[in-house]
Image (cartoon, grey):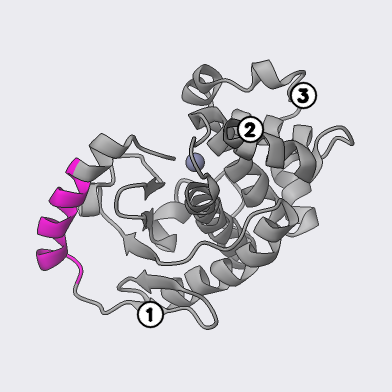
Amino acid sequence: MEMSDRLSAFVAVLMTAFACTVTAAAPTRCSGTDVFVAGADDTDVAEACRAAAEARGVLQAIGLELPWGVAIRLVERAGDDGLGVGERARYETGSHAIVLRGYATTARAMPPGLAEDSAAAGRAVWRSYVVHELAHAAIHLSCVSTCPRRAVHEYVAAVAQYSSLPADLRADLVGRFGDVAPWGSEAEISDTYYAVDPERFAVKSYLHYRQPQAGPEFVRRLVHGGDR
Ligand SMILES: [Zn+2]
């Protein structure tokens, strides 16, 4: 997810106020990166760092670098650090920060028979949500003069998210959408579709990316199209 600069600047002010009362833990710097994670649960912090390590290769494969100077804050309750009710995660452009619900809360909202049946699968899906937000941060650092429209952001974030999953788990998740087809054309990749059904949007994006005519070259053109 992504917010407008103006709104995120406002939220950043709110978060500064929250940070004094809610977030006590000192952030952990993920080894070999410039990504910092703060959260109350040590396993969640370690898993977020694992996601950052996984994100590096995934992002490089689509022509992006692991973002630097990113602060990830893990929260539990709605309202913590400005995360809305039912909102899983958010990247804030103004503060270059990611706010994400911890694993325990997130797992309860995962597709049925996933986290309950396999903690490893649940954890992998949670890490893929971290990769999704890191992709948003990476795009922001890479766009030189004109940043892409929202649907492009979400296309790339979805590709990174699904690419980071183990193949069998990815096939299971994609299979749950049954008849979903890849995007038929670039024009179909719309903000409106994303707003109506973000989960289906993500699967359509990943399936589109996997087609021979798309892939990393298509992503490069989408992300940097406005810079040429
Ligand atoms: Zn997103």
Identify which residue, 179 or 27, lies in the foreground: 27
Image coords of residue 40 (percent x, y): 30, 73
Viewer can see residue 105: yes
Q: CA distance from mark 1 to mark 3?
A: 40 Å
Quarter placement of the N terminus: top left
Image coords of residue 81 (percent x, y): 23, 54
Name the N-terminal-most of marks 1 and 2.
1
Q: Name the mark on residue 225.
A: 2
Q: Secondary structure at mark 1?
A: strand
Q: CA distance from mark 1 to mark 2?
A: 36 Å
Question: Are the residues at dot 1 and dot 2 in contact (C-beta closer than 8 Å)?
Answer: no
Q: Name the mark on residue 213.
A: none
Image point 76% across, 26% down: which residue? 182
Identify which residue, 67 or 55, lies in the foreground: 67
Q: Nearer the viewer, mark 2 or mark 3?
A: 2
The verdict on residue 148 being magenta is no
Question: Are the residues at dot 1 and dot 3 in contact (C-beta closer than 8 Å)?
Answer: no
Q: Secondary structure at mark 2?
A: helix
Q: Nearer the viewer, mark 1 or mark 2?
A: 2
Whether residue 37 is situated above or below residue 134 in the rendered picture: below
Query: Which residue is denoted by mark 3 in the rendering?
Result: 181
